[in-house]
């Protein structure tokens, strides 16, 4: 188990608490993917149990976790979003990039766009650069309160090295909170300067 998955499972163990410790132990011991998938649709399951099942299925590459993970990626709780992004990055479902792009570019949910933006960078999919460009363009406003999302877009576009990002990154250089990262991102894009 890697450090990220250990962090997720420890958080969910604490969330289960003493009352759910037996259920948590049973859920972590399940080896059968069909049984884990059943937790996603069973009545009366607490959110921590559904999240644990979805993350375990995602990491195992079982696409039955996709819908649950996308819902968690759009959750208001950042640790749940991070866990979903981690699992979706390992799931390798071809629908993931399209879903992450839709979440990242949804202006009504921009407060929760940080993890979809980071996931798009990790995926390096055809949808990644256009979604990051669109999201960053909307953040280039002196009074925009979503500086972390803007910075993640800038860093992601630098990592992707897509020449289509040059105009928006050049514009981002004019914003003090983004200038250094935007300049570094521009330096990573091959071709004309």
Image (cartoon, rainbow, N blue to C red):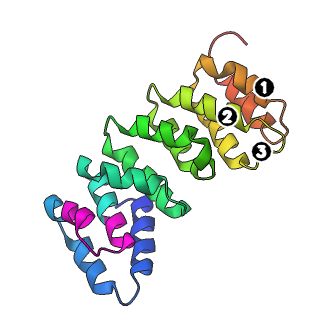
Q: Which mark is residue 144?
A: 3
Q: Earlier in the sequence, mark 3 or mark 1?
A: 3
Q: Is residue 180 left or right of residue 88?
A: right
Find disc 2 in the rendering and name its residue.
136
Q: Which residues are magenta?
A: 36-52
Work out which quarter of the rendered image holds the N terminus and state it.
bottom left
| Disc 3 to disc 2, C-alpha distance | 11 Å
Label 3 or label 1, whichever lies nearer to me, is: 3
Q: Is residue 158 visible?
A: no
Q: Earlier in the sequence, mark 3 or mark 2?
A: 2
Badge 2 crowding class, 10 Å Cα cut-off, few under 14, some 14 to 19, many 20 or more, is: many
Say which residue label 1 marks. Answer: 171
Q: Main secondary structure of the magenta part?
A: helix
Note whether 109 is above or below 51 in the view shown.
Answer: above
Spot occupied by residue 18 in the image (x, y as percentages of width and height): 38, 90
**Left or right for 63, reference 98:** left
- Contact between marks 3 and 2 (CB within 8 A): the answer is no
Q: Using a 10 Å C-alpha cutoff, classify the residue at mark 3 as few (fewer than 14 neighbours), some (14 to 19) or many (20 or more).
A: few
């Amino acid at each position: 188990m890697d450090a990220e998955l250990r962090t997720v499972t420890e958080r969910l163990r604490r969330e289960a608490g003493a009352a759910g410790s037996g259920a948590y132990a049973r859920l972590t011991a399940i080896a059968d993917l069909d049984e884990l998938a059943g937790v996603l649709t069973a009545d009366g399951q607490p959110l921590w149990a559904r999240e644990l099942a979805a993350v375990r299925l995602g990491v195992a590459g079982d696409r039955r976790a996709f819908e649950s993970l996308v819902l968690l990626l759009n959750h208001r709780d950042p640790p749940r979003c991070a866990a979903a992004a981690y699992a979706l990055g390992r799931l390798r479902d071809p629908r993931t990039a399209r879903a992450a792009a839709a979440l990242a570019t949804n202006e009504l949910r921009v407060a929760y766009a940080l993890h979809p933006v980071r996931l798009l960078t990790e995926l390096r999919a055809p949808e990644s650069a256009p979604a990051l460009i669109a999201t960053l363009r909307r953040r280039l406003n002196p009074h925009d309160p979503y500086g972390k999302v803007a910075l993640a877009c800038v860093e992601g576009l630098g990592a992707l090295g897509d020449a289509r990002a040059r105009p928006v990154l050049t514009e981002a250089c004019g914003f003090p909170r983004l200038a250094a990262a935007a300049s570094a991102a521009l330096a990573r894009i091959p071709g004309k300067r």
